């Protein structure tokens, strides 16, 4: 299952991040830059008391890269996009999926006692997007609706 990432050691290397001059609207799924990840780590003082930078960074990497039990966000997102035939829809979805991955991954990677997005949320959202992918007709509309629904739920949880 995509996001059923458990308490295993996180990989040591970053997945491909956006390169210089690349934007979120690029054609590829990518994880946040180290600077973006560090900014979130530094912003959350409660998490810093419970988790080192190295631990946090490792869990963000694990979210995006996956492990031997689960595909990470990057691979799952790419397979979600594979069935989208409309180029314009695909580009819009890449941007939305990249944003959503950053939103979810940076929060989920925090220590379990302070994070507002849990592994149960990841499983629920995985199922929602997977169901939309299976029902999509190639236009990407079902997937886009599911991604928007997940984004709304995640943002609501982050405010709470």
Image (cartoon, rainbow, N blue to C red):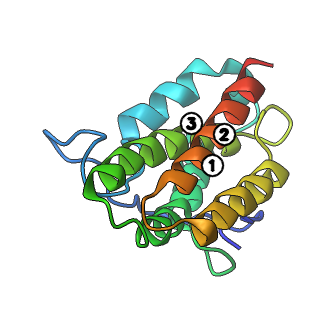
Q: Which mark is residue 149?
A: 2
Alpha carbon distance from label 2 to label 3:
13 Å
Q: Which mark is residue 146?
A: 1
Query: Do the numbered discs 3 and 1 sit on residues whose CB atoms are within 8 Å?
Result: no
32 sits to left or right of 153: left
Residue that appears at 27% across and 47% down: 18
Residue that appears at 70% across and 60% down: 126
Q: Name which quarter of the figure residue 130 lies in.
A: bottom right
Query: Taking 139 as reference, is 151 above or below it?
Result: above
8 sits to left or right of 79: right
Residue that appears at 64% across and 58% down: 129
Q: Name which quarter of the figure residue 117 lies in.
A: top right
Measuring from the top left, give residue 34's x and y in whole percent.
Answer: 39, 41
Measuring from the top left, give residue 143's x and y in whole percent.
Answer: 55, 55
Q: Earlier in the sequence, mark 2 or mark 3?
A: 3
Query: Do the numbered discs 2 and 1 sit on residues whose CB atoms are within 8 Å?
Result: yes
Q: Nearer the viewer, mark 3 or mark 1?
A: 1
Q: Nearer the viewer, residue 132 or 109?
A: 132
Asked which secondary structure carries label 3, the reply is helix
Residue 126, can we see it? yes
Query: Where is mark 3, residue-wise?
Result: 103
Asked which secondary structure carries label 2, the reply is helix
């Amino acid at each position: 299952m995509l996001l059923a990432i458990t308490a295993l050691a996180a990989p040591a290397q970053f997945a491909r991040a956006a390169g210089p001059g690349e934007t979120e609207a690029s054609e590829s799924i990518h994880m946040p830059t180290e600077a973006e990840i560090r900014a979130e780590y530094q912003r959350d003082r409660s998490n810093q008391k419970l988790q080192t930078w190295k631990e946090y960074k490792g869990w963000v990497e694990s979210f995006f890269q996956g492990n031997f039990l689960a595909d990470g966000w990057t691979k799952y997102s790419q397979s979600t996009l594979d069935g989208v035939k409309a180029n314009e829809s695909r580009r819009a979805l890449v941007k939305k999926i990249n944003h959503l991955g950053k939103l979810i991954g940076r929060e989920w990677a925090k220590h379990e006692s302070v994070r507002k997005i849990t592994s149960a949320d990841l499983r629920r959202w995985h199922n929602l997007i997977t169901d939309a992918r299976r029902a999509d007709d190639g236009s990407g509309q079902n997937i886009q609706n599911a991604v928007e629904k997940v984004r709304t739920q995640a943002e609501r949880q982050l405010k709470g």
